[in-house]
Amino acid sequence: MRHVIALDVGGTGMKAALVGDDGELLHRARRATGRERGPDAVVATILDFAAELHAYGAEHHGAAAAAAGIAVPGIVDEERGIAAYAANLGWRDVPLRALLAERLGIPVALGHDVRTGGLAEGRIGAGRGADRFLFVPLGTGIAGAIGIDGRVEAGAHGFAGEIGHVVVRPGGIPCPCGQHGCLERYASASAVTEAWAASCGDPDADAADCAKAVASGDPNAVRVWQEAIDALADGLVTALTLLDPRTLIIGGGLAEAGEVLFQPLREAVRRRVTFQRLPAIVPAALGDTAGCLGAGLLARDLLTPGPLDSTDPLDSTDPDSTDPSEVTA
């Protein structure tokens, strides 16, 4: 069976799959990145893991993979196939696409993790059928993926979609990027965690605890939560003014709060729009499998003349079942 390798590299672990032509997930595996051993060891681990997946496909599915896709964090030069920088992995200017292509002997696509996850959400997830979408995951930080007609825009230098560094509170909290008042310093899951822990006096409290307290009517939690919602709405309205998306997809850890997040967020955005068209604001559908699924789409695009049809069945396979050969990260 013809298939591709899909690999999603995170800060501490990697998710991988072999994906058939019909979108079926034929095999899944996980592996630790080994970042504690340094950036060279991380690259070696990626290459070894990909080679194992390649060999597994040849042994169990009648042929080796036809292509591979890999999603990585940080700054990514997708056109040249270079992983330019990732603070959590410690690497700089790694020619990852060329290294993988040489090791595997097949075409390889390299993508940015958020843009790759956005590609999956746009084609087979919450944005399926939308010609223009914006995917915004609210996690440790905030990033974005700008979807246009089945592809995701990287920008001239690979920085498109960095909505987390839109300044929403001028002169506000310092950000590691060098600015003050960036969106992710107010509305990311880590920002809400920090604000709620300080407010409630419990250093172990996190954003999920804050959401639960909001649902129970805690006025202190409601204040912290609303401040994050207001900052997020300010950033999102700036984005939709510039991009005019048909669908706005919110993912990441903070989105797990469900309607505790989405009901006030939709209202806050609605209050702020004037001439703009209000997009559908929906939760992401693919969870933490989006990056891996998107990497599979990148690989399969190398074998097809254009983006896959929006009815692709890739999302019909249960992402939560476990292959007995998996190695837990």
Image: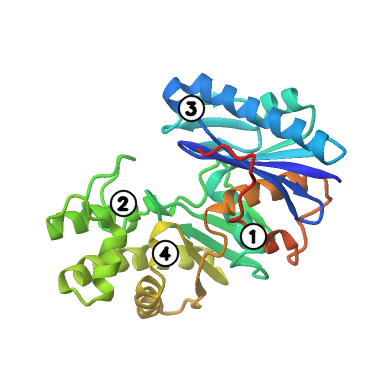
Residue named by callout 4: 256
Within 10 Å of disc 3 (Cα), the crowding (few <14, some 14-19, many 20+) is many
Task: From the viewer's perspective, tell me whether residue 193 is left or right of residue 322.
Answer: left
Q: Which residue is mark 1?
A: 318
Please name the residue shown 37% across and 73% down the image.
Answer: 265
Q: Are marks 2 and 1 in contact (CB under 8 Å)?
A: no
- Which numbered disc, 4 or 1, marks the residue that appears first in the sequence? 4
Residue labelled with disc 2: 190
Percent coordinates x, y for residue 158 in the rendering: 55, 42
Helix, strand or loop at disc 2?
A: helix
73 w.r.t. 127: above or below: above
Which residue is at 84% across, 51% downward? 305
Nearest to viewer (mark 4 / mark 1): 1
In whole angstroms, how far apart are the C-alphas of marks 3 and 1?
28 Å
Mark 1 or mark 3, which is nearer the start of the sequence? 3
Question: Label 4 to label 3, Cα distance in Å?
Answer: 28 Å
Closer to the chain start, of discs 4 and 3, is 3
Say which amino acid is labelled 1: Asp
Residue corresponding to mark 3: 34
Q: Is residue 325 visible?
A: yes
Label ID, residue 253? none
Residue under the point 71% across and 58% down: 314
Q: Amino acid at mark 4?
A: Glu
Between disc 2 and disc 1, the foreground one is 1
Q: Would residue 292 be found to the left or right of residue 234 on screen?
A: right
SS class, disc 4: helix
